[in-house]
Image: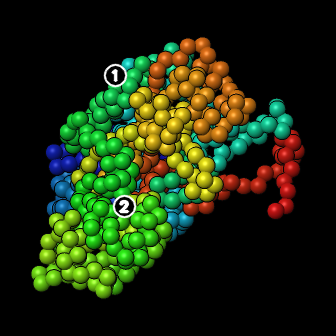
Amino acid sequence: MAQLLKRTHMCGVLRAENAGEKVVLNGWIAKQRDKGGIIFADLRDKTGIVQLTFDEGVPEDVFSLAQTLRGEYVIGAAGTVRERSAKNPDLPTGDIEILVEKLVIYSKAETPPIYIKDDDNVDDNLRLKYRYLDLRKLKMQRNLSFRHRIAKVTRDYFDQNGFTEVETPMLVRSTPEGARDYLVPSRVNRGQFYALPQSPQLFKQLLMVGGTDRYIQIVKCFRDEDLRADRQPEFTQIDMEMSFVDVDDVLAIQEGYLATLFREVMGVEIQLPLPRLTWDEAMERYGSDKPDTRFGFELKCLNQIPCVKDTEFMVFRNALDNGGDVRGICIDGGSKAFSRKDIDKLTEQTKAYGAKGVIWIRKEEDGYKSSVNKFFAPEQLAEITEVFDAQAGDLILIVADKPKVVFDSLGFLRRHIAGLLGLLDNKQFNLLWVVDFPMFEMDDEDGTMKAMHHPFTHPKEEDIPMLDTDPLSVKADAYDIVLNGVELGGGSIRIHDSELQAKMFDILGISKEESQKKFGFLLEAFRYGTPPHGGIAYGLDRMVMLLAGESSIREVMAFPKNQNAQCMVSDAPNAVDTAQLAELGIGLCDE
């Protein structure tokens, strides 16, 4: 067994001021270059790379051993830090090198199946299959350390503000929370199943009943749903709940947390209090309840403009007569930036959001060009462009349809176009709250009413009388925190009154028997004295992704699943032995 050289420094921390010091380093060989009478080797650990040098001054056995070094060999090296004659300005340690006096090879390595460098451009599935090699990249180690830093700042802040970290169960009862549960069969209770929690929602409310007062947990959650860049079957939440609070209390604590997080992790001071937009205002101005405010292009409503309200142009007429909207956005300088072909492509992309088409108007120095010139006179086009305060060279894009289609389509267009124009500055952090969400919404598939968040969300006190007369107009004490057009987290004040909770179930068409079956243990607890309470949960993976400047949460998770929810390292999920299934009382059926 090779002798262990006890490390004194990490590779990436050495600088010119360390010249003359005796050091011991451990790590992986990134590259070796044999120049005949001198050998250079780049040594890597999670902090960075430093150059090792072996020349005629080192012991002969050390030089001979250095000649055998290959990529990904794990070694220990003892030597002296000295200034490099040929400095490397692209490397943080580029001013120095280590003149090696002692060398130990701990283990040799075969040629790895992927390159161990940040810009390798390797297929994602190959990266995930050999994730333990992929993790050696400096970028991945930086991301993991960055995630650790965020988690530590989070725990410290909430500890200092009276929160108790409590672990909630991983094997729970299956309850509907908007996605499929992952089910776990019970051997002891044959034919019955646990579910992996989609969130700790019900248990954290029980902790409030139990007098915990302020709860915090960084917790794994599970949802069996289709994947995308910011979604995984198992993900991590920063989850919390507070007793005897209203919306302002919860938001004040969160703003203190976010200010601390950005200061300590990003070196950025954010201005408090954060802006608040009602859900209605966010939709009206931005077409999204996750508005990106780093740029303009705000939506304008054209419904009441005379040339639109009284038009016989069927696209507008049909929308208005069927309770729809006519709205648009104005792109500053967009007339030159987007050709007719570009606009056709944008139009095609909006079809994914239900739009049948996009109407365009170019304002020019000498008049107007548009896709509706034969339906609207120049003075009518002027009337429309005045709503947007459009200037010569601007481009107006209009969608007419059901409100949801209009909002979704224009919300997509404003952010997509901002990206095409280079307006999405990732070094700018625009945080805001969206508050006063609708309590209910209609399900597009079956036409039934459903809770926009969940059935335990408290309606705004002044709207409670409308539960009997106009439930779709009721607003909720719910709130989301949004960063640059992405939801970081969300929460609400919860219902703590049994009669109000029963009314909520009734509106949602959940019978007394069904509510007892699904939520009986929570409702039972509420009978014994429940404090007013509310909370919030952040998506930790998404938060780290955004602050690290990554485009996928897989880049900030150690062992993520691929797009088919498979763990490429361990080959999970996999078939299990029939004896295991028999022990659980489970049989597989052919599809």
Disc 2 to disc 1, C-alpha distance = 39 Å
Horizontal and vertical percent for residue 385?
Answer: 21, 70
**Image quadrant in which you'd find residue 328:** bottom left
Q: Residues within 10 Å of mark 1 (few under 14, many from 20)?
A: few
Q: Amino acid at mark 2?
A: Gly
Q: Residues within 10 Å of mark 2 (few under 14, many from 20)?
A: many
Q: Nearer the viewer, residue 231 or 9?
A: 231
In this rendering, the answer to whether 531 lies above or below 393 is: above
Q: Is residue 585 visible?
A: yes
Q: Image check: 537 left or right of 387?
A: right
Q: Amino acid at mark 1?
A: Gln
**Residue of label 1:** 160
Q: Is residue 549 visible?
A: no
Horizontal and vertical percent for residue 583?
Answer: 86, 41
**Image quadrant in which you'd find residue 262:** top left
Q: Nearer the viewer, residue 388 or 352?
A: 388
Q: Which numbered marker is on residue 224?
A: none
Secondary structure, mark 2, is helix
Question: How many marks are shown on the rendered structure?
Answer: 2
**Residue of label 2:** 411
Farthest left residue in view: 365
Q: Identify which residue is drawn at 20% across, 48% down.
A: 15
Q: Identify which residue is drawn at 66% across, 30% down.
A: 519
